[in-house]
């Protein structure tokens, strides 16, 4: 096949013969063209192979052959088109008559001119159909007797055979729908007429979109038929060519199979690694993989280690078969206690840190000592010292008596032993529990809420290198619902692991399976260590964002806190200061110190100096506690009196 333009190839293409393989004979590149904006291909290199799989009609451009005007119509245009002319034009009427005689055509013959014809009696507009009935001799010349039909009246015109055109032979055919008129090869480049359009004649120029496959292109390539490129049909000689189409793991997951699927890595995503494992380094370009299918169950648990300075983080599959035992949870704030409180499940804790009631704006709180036992009851509100309501946690202080006491006795002392902890209250608590059961991970998730602290007491039998039993404690933080793919290395089929396409979306290509591969799915590692960077990426997931932030403690009143007191406190304070200023001994201090002897003066100054040190110590202690508004002016005065 000789190279033709892409538009001509598509117009003459039989859609039943798809797919067709084309070779680009002349490349094209439009930088920043409209094709890029529309998502179509705009760059084709000479020698590229294109496998056309589908052709879609986008629109049809109607052109007036006389004026060159154009208009666009949609592919679903409902009008009908009738072909008007033959495939050839003639420069004069004599050529038209001669061609009809050679083809043994009998008169009358229909024709039309693309230019205006002016006669002695009438002006014939362009594109106006005429009917040539006969050729007559008139004063030694031959003239064509033509009939002009205006649908209201017929006129007889005598035109010389030397009348210049161009003229098109008019062969009116049966009306056809738009798509049928375009698909008929015999009507290519013919003039049409359509009653619903304003022109007497027009040329149809369809514009198609080709959907094709190209080498190393991950998606279907869309090529407009108007792209100025020449192509050659090489389907017959290209039956052995296989077009490599890259795939993402996310696309394989979306299409759901078929599995197992042998693949080869073409590209790995950039960025730091997300897993810490022996198989991570094998995920390089050229590595062959076998994708076995979707991992089950679809949930994972994010786990952090406890009891080490630098914690490590793991992602544990829901299929983990190790045995776990619950550990007492640790809580640093009252807000943490409220988050761990579950309906119908009692929560008892033991204080592991002494805490006084100073700075706590809850009237129902005095102090906590190490070893105090509390039962968390509910959340509530209390009236704070600043006159505002604060959120509190209602707790019951438990005595060291036996827990089997009657409920009536507890009700009698309930109001007396209640403690109201503000949610911003910071201390240290440890859960009081007595649970020696061994749970599976699935049972633990079904019975308890997260976060939860556990100890692995029996490792998974199918995973000899299970690292979890070596840690003194684990914190189960969050359940992650995300699909994973089970993958094994072609070079080491026994190394089977799970990959999340959301965060590790490899670009692969399908390959042929290697002989000797083991049947079925090999055992999968259910524990994978994750890097710190990926751990904090997981912590930013919506599942973690739904956790409300802890409440902020009230602002400290600072060194000028006495200004925030009520007017009554201020008046009382000023009255005490005025009493100090009116003390009769302060003026006497100056009268007695002037006439004293040197010895007495030295003793006096030594006493004052010693007292100044005490004043400095007192000032320092007051500065360290900016919230202490009660200044001991009476004590300062008493010290001066004793010194003097």
Image (cartoon, helix red, strand yellow):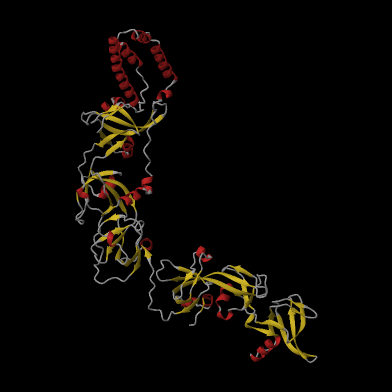
Q: 489 or 48: which is nearer to us?
A: 48
- Which residue is farthest front? 598
Q: Is residue 60 left or right of residue 427?
A: right
Pinpoint residue 482: horizontal percent, then vertical percent. 34, 54
Quadrant position of residue 80? bottom right
Q: Is residue 227 left or right of residue 513?
A: right
Quadrant position of residue 118? bottom right
Pinpoint residue 221: horizontal percent, then vertical percent. 45, 68
Q: 430 or 27: which is nearer to us?
A: 27
Residue beneath the point at 46% across and 73% down: 45
Q: Give the total of numbered labels.
A: 0
Q: Is residue 264 left or right of residue 72?
A: left
Q: 426 or 585: which is nearer to us?
A: 585
Q: Is residue 593 visible?
A: yes
Image height of 62 relative to 448, above or below? below
Q: Is residue 374 left or right of residue 247?
A: left
Image height of 410 relative to 113, above or below? above
Pinpoint residue 456: horizontal percent, then vertical percent. 21, 48
Pinpoint residue 370: horizontal percent, then vertical percent. 24, 30
Image height of 609 relative to 442, above or below? above
Quadrant position of residue 74? bottom right
| Quadrant the C terminus occupies | top left
Q: Is residue 317 visible?
A: no
């Amino acid at each position: 096949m000789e190279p033709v333009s892409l538009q001509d190839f598509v117009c003459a293409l039989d859609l039943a013969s798809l797919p067709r393989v084309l070779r680009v004979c002349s490349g094209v590149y439009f930088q920043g063209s409209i094709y890029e904006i529309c998502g179509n291909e705009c760059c084709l290199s000479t020698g590229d192979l294109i496998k056309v799989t589908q052709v879609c009609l986008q629109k049809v451009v109607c052109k007036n052959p006389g004026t060159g005007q154009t208009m666009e119509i949609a592919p679903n245009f409902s009008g009908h088109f009738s072909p008007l002319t033959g495939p050839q034009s003639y420069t004069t009427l004599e050529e038209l008559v001669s061609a009809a005689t050679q083809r043994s055509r009998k008169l009358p013959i229909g024709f039309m001119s693309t230019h205006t014809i002016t006669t002695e009696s009438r002006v014939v507009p362009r594109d106006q159909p005429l009917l040539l009935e006969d050729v007559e001799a008139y004063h030694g010349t031959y003239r064509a007797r033509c009939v002009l039909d205006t649908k209201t009246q017929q006129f007889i015109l005598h035109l010389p055979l030397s009348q210049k055109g161009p003229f098109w032979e008019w062969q009116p055919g049966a009306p056809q729908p738009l798509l049928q008129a375009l698909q008929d090869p015999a009507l290519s480049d013919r003039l049409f007429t359509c009653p619903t359009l304003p022109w007497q004649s027009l040329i149809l120029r369809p514009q198609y979109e080709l959907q094709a496959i190209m080498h190393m292109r991950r998606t279907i390539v869309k090529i407009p038929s108007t792209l100025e490129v020449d192509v050659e049909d090489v389907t017959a000689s290209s039956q052995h060519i296989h077009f490599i189409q890259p795939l993402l793991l996310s696309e394989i997951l979306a299409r759901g199979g078929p599995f197992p699927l042998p693949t080869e890595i073409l590209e790995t995503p950039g960025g730091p690694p997300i897993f810490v494992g022996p198989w991570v380094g094998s995920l390089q370009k050229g590595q062959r993989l076998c994708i076995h299918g979707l991992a089950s169950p679809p949930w994972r648990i994010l786990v952090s280690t406890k009891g080490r300075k630098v914690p490590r983080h793991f992602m544990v599959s829901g299929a983990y078969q190790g045995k776990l035992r619950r550990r007492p949870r640790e809580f640093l704030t009252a807000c943490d206690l409220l988050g761990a409180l579950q309906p119908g499940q009692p929560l008892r804790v033991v204080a592991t840190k002494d805490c006084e009631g100073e700075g706590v704006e809850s009237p129902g709180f005095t102090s906590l000592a190490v070893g105090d036992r509390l039962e968390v009851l509910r959340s509530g509100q209390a009236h704070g010292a600043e006159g505002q309501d604060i959120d509190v946690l209602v707790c019951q202080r438990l005595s060291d008596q036996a827990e089997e006491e009657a409920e009536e006795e507890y009700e009698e002392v309930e109001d007396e032993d209640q403690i109201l902890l503000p949610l911003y209250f910071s201390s240290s608590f440890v859960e009081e529990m007595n649970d020696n059961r061994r749970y599976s991970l699935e049972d633990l998730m079904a019975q308890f809420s997260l976060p939860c602290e556990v100890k692995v007491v029996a490792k998974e039998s199918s995973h000899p290198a299970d690292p979890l039993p070596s840690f003194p404690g684990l914190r189960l933080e969050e359940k992650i619902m995300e699909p994973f793919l089970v993958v094994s290395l072609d070079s080491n089929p026994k190394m089977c692991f799970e990959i999340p396409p959301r965060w590790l979306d490899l670009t692969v290509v399908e390959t042929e399976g290697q002989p000797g591969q083991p049947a079925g799915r090999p055992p999968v590692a259910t524990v994978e260590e994750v890097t710190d960077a990926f751990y904090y990426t997981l912590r930013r997931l919506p599942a973690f964002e739904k956790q409300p932030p802890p409440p902020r403690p009230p602002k400290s009143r600072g060194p000028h806190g006495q200004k925030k007191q009520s007017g009554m406190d201020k008046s009382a304070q000023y009255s005490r200061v005025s009493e100090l200023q009116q003390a009769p001994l302060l003026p006497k201090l100056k009268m007695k110190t002037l006439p004293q002897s040197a010895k007495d003066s030295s003793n006096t100054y030594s006493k004052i100096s010693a007292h100044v040190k005490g004043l400095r110590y007192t000032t320092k202690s007051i500065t360290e506690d900016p919230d202490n508004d009660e200044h001991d002016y009476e004590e300062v005065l008493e010290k001066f009196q004793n010194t003097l």
